[in-house]
Amino acid sequence: MIISINPFKKLKIYDEQNLKLYESGQDDQNLPPHLFAVAQRAYSSLVEQSESQSLIISGESGAGKTEATKYILKYLSHVASNTKSTEQNDIANRIMATNPILEAFGNAKTQRNNNSSRFGKFIKISMSKEGKYLGASINNYLLEKTRVVFQAPTERNYHVFYQLLLGASPEERERYKLLERVEDYYYMSNGWVEVENIDDVQSFITLKNSFKELGIQEDEVRIYFTLLSAILLLGNVQFFGEDDVTIKEMSLIETIASLLQITTACLKEILTHRTIVTSVEKCRIPLRFDQAHENRDALAKALYSRIFDHLIKRCNDCIGEKETYDSLFIGVLDIYGFENLENNSLEQFCINYA
């Protein structure tokens, strides 16, 4: 067990020199406690005892769990890179390339943490008995979907929205039908935009490079960004009427429908009616004003959740887990931290219960 304290700044103890120091294992008893030491011990135990290992990263929200996870993965990737095997290096690089993608789509600024993970993940690195990488897989848990449509005043939506809106080129802005300002989107108007030590423009470049590193084609990446734009525009859809609502701005519906590649009539139907299917008939029921807004937000949350799940699947496809009957693994669990905020919701209940 190691107690790791978040200093909220970069430290030199995680540099290349320390990587090599803890990998050598020389005078292990005399080396100070370190995340690298824990990772090395797990790796050594896997090889020497032929037993799978798991590292559990726990603590309150803002304790630095995600950063600790990244340093552990960095160390394990370093161990793999020293095998002088092109295949091993490629697997390690692709595993590390998933970090910027998962952070962009799964992390956000909260009251306590500028880069808070809003989902849990279990990263399973498959290895042979000799300690060679076979691949990896990622399981995700409890994505905070509510954040897509609402954020507290001092918080932000998911990083990827700001990266897209602030980092897109003029050509990309036209392709994805982006509005001029972040604040022009209802789903982005509640929280903060700029955050200290977060460069959304540079992060957008890093995100696109990470997709390339994984081998995800540009056409597929464009689909993700197109869907993100559609989600943001959904928040700007307004209704009028009480018992049988009508959409105020049909031109907006046309834009969203084109991004989703469905007909305008289909999207209008989805947003203004619900369907009840019985054994004998199918009934269309118009939505009330409050129901229409809830339905709109539910659609936005469902779309984002599907995008996130698909991204996890694509990451798993690219980091290529190749288990054999006798393969072992090192698992790293980065789960939610306990949260007790000024205003708590169902998410906090689920997080704390889990």
Image (cartoon, rainbow, N blue to C red):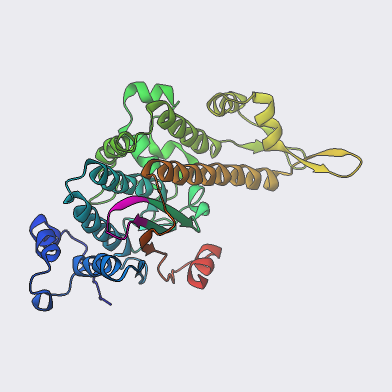
Task: In the displayed orientation, state which residue is furthest to the right.
Answer: 280
Residue 257 horizontal/vertical position (percent): 59, 27
Residue at 39% over, 38% down: 182
Of 273 and 21, the residue lying toward us = 21
Question: In the drawing, does residue 291 fall left or right of residue 173?
Answer: right
Residue 66 visible, this angle: yes
Residue 344 visible, this angle: no
Residue 273 horizontal/vertical position (percent): 74, 38
From this view, report whether residue 23 is shown above or below residue 186: below
Q: State the quadrant of the N terminus.
A: bottom left
Q: Magenta span covers which residues?
A: 125-135
Residue at 17% over, 74% down: 33
From this view, report whether residue 59 is shown above or below residue 176: below
Instruction: Tally the numbered discs.
Output: 0
Residue at 41% over, 55% down: 153
Question: In the drawing, does residue 284 fall left or right of residue 68?
Answer: right
Of 148 and 2, the residue lying toward us = 2
Residue 272 horizontal/vertical position (percent): 71, 37
From this view, report whether residue 303 is shown above or below residue 116: above
Residue 123 horizontal/vertical position (percent): 38, 57
Question: In the drawing, does residue 230 fall left or right of residue 26?
Answer: right
Of 273 and 338, the residue lying toward us = 338
Residue at 50% over, 70% down: 354
> Can residue 276 be found in the magenta stretch?
no
